[in-house]
Image (cartoon, grey):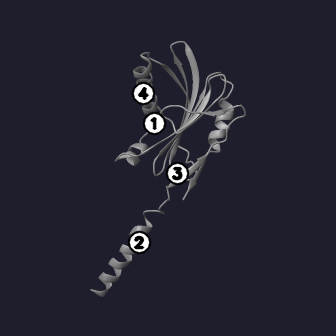
């Protein structure tokens, strides 16, 4: 009986070790490197927005997570993201977009789960490139880079690599 209790105690002590370390995901702020020439502006529906005269912009949104968001975040793919964006563009602008993938990755940002999706979209004769970086933390943090000219994407990719989340 004593051996059985010792075994159970040892098993109970090992179980938490298999869960991995708990990551603190409470973000208190963030920093985004801005290319030269981008100025802050207000935009409805976004937390912060910076733009340049050619219409290119960078914006951030922070949204509360709904129940099941962590599980849903794990299954996000380029196909799922593309389909969702196509529906959003069509419902917002009434025109079916043509979306061409550049890349999709699930590289962490500051040790937190994230995905990066870069694509070209043609919408009613206008072509632009967007880079989305979405981070799954205490809330969902989305950084959207929109290049209207094709001149900014390299700087946007460099900025995205340097997104800093301030974690408490």
Identify residue for label 4: 83
Which marked residue is nearer to the observer: mark 2 or mark 4? 4
Identify residue for label 1: 77
- Identify the residue at horizontal 38%, vertical 47% (top origin): 71
Relative to 44, 127 lies left or right = right
- Identify the residue at horizontal 67%, vertical 28% (top origin): 152
In the rendered image, residue 155, in percent from the top left (x then y), is placed at 69, 34
Secondary structure under tag 1 reads: loop
Label 1 to label 4: alpha-carbon separation = 10 Å
Which marked residue is nearer to the observer: mark 1 or mark 4? 4
Label 3 to label 4: alpha-carbon separation = 25 Å
Q: Quick one: label 3, few (<14), some, or many (20+) residues within 10 Å?
A: some
Marks 2 and 3: in contact by CB < 8 Å? no
Secondary structure under tag 4 reads: helix
- Residue 104 visible from this viewpoint: no
- Identify the residue at horizontal 59%, vertical 48% (top origin): 30
64 in relation to 168, above or below: above
Q: In the picture, which quadrant includes the N terminus?
A: bottom left
First-in-chain label (2 vs 4): 2
Q: As drawn, which residue projects farthest toward the right?
A: 36
Label 1 to label 3: alpha-carbon separation = 17 Å
Relative to 15, 4 lies left or right = left
Identify residue for label 2: 14
Label 2 to label 4: alpha-carbon separation = 43 Å
Which marked residue is nearer to the observer: mark 1 or mark 2? 1
Q: Which mark is residue 112?
A: 3
Question: How many numbered marks, from 0 up?
Answer: 4
Q: Quick one: label 2, few (<14), some, or many (20+) residues within 10 Å?
A: few
């Amino acid at each position: 009986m004593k051996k059985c209790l010792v075994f159970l105690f040892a098993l109970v002590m090992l179980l938490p070790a298999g869960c991995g370390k708990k990551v603190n995901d409470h973000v208190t702020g963030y920093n985004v490197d801005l290319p030269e020439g981008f100025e802050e502006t207000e935009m409805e529906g976004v937390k912060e927005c910076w733009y340049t005269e050619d219409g290119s912009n960078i914006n951030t949104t922070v949204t509360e997570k709904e129940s099941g968001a962590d599980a849903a975040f794990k299954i996000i793919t380029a196909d799922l993201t593309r389909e969702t964006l196509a529906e959003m563009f069509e419902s917002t602008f009434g025109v079916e977009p043509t979306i061409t993938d550049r890349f999709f990755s699930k590289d962490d940002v500051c040790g937190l789960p994230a995905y990066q999706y870069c694509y070209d979209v043609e919408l009613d004769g206008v072509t632009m490139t967007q880079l989305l970086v979405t981070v799954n933390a205490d809330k969902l943090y989305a950084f959207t880079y929109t290049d209207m000219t094709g001149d900014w994407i390299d700087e946007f990719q460099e900025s995205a690599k340097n997104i800093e989340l301030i974690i408490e």
